[in-house]
Amino acid sequence: AQSVAQPEDQVNVAEGNPLTVKCTYSVSGNPYLFWYVQYPNRGLQFLLKYITGDNLVKGSYGFEAEFNKSQTSFHLKKPSALVSDSALYFCAVRPTGRRALTFGSGTRLQVQP
Amino acid sequence: NAGVTQTPKFRVLKTGQSMTLLCAQDMNHEYMYWYRQDPGMGLRLIHYSVGEGTTAKGEVPDGYNVSRLKKQNFLLGLESAAPSQTSVYFCASSGGRQGAYEQYFGPGTRLTVT
């Protein structure tokens, strides 16, 4: 069965510092991988995805993620955090041939001024 | 272009009551989904649809039913609400081949069952 792990419930980082939100997955085949962000009392917003090709994927709001097949990871990164990046971040995986996403449990990012 | 909309935004039910949540999308997407979000558990798929007139079970389908009579609408029904169904419900839609593109989410419905 496919699964997604976000090992950190919360990540704290100072404004201006680089941030990393971790995600590892366990699926058969070649997965599609996604990152979403959720602001308070809002639905999820798409940030970026990996389908195939370049392992470094760039997305919205300056975020990027690196697909690492050998480590089955898809960590979300940003070179310089903003206070406005504080939100709940979800990693999701869609195995090829499947029709739905499996979400991780979420990581709360807190950026301190 | 409203994207994905959900009605109602909030609802309080008593145990045993029924209700229907409505999701509508205006992006001509084939795929639509219903999720529930509970603290510390991420989003869990309840049911989904790969096109008008089709539905399929997700990870946690028990106690819920769905219908997709029109391509743009996806309804989630609770026939006899239970306190365990207290949650935030999100609808989503996606396009592309086999719905492979990113999903677009509605704003959510907060349901409390007492």
Image: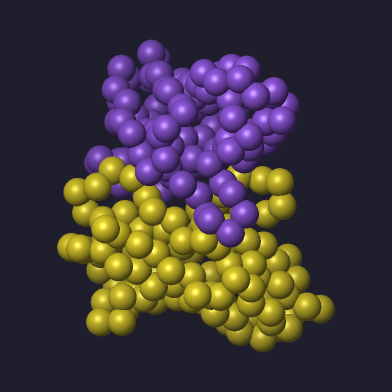
Position of A95 with respect to B105 (left or right) is left
The answer to whether one can see residue B9 in this image is no
**In the rendering, at what x and y percent does residue B107 appear?**
63, 38
Q: Is residue B1 above or below residue A49?
A: above
For this orientation, the residue located farthest to the right is A113
Residue in front for this viewpoint, A88 or A83:
A88
Residue B2 is situated, as x and y percent measured from the top left of the image, at 59, 30
Q: Colour of chain B?
A: purple
Residue occupying the far bottom of the picture: A17
Percent x, y of residue A18: 61, 84
Please name the residue shown 54% across and 79% down the image: A20
User: Which quadrant holds residue B80?
Assistant: top right
Q: Colour of chain A?
A: yellow
Q: Please provide percent x and percent y for residue B108.
A: 62, 37
Residue A49: quarter of image: bottom left
Above or below residue B71? Residue A43 is below
B75 left or right, relative to A78: left
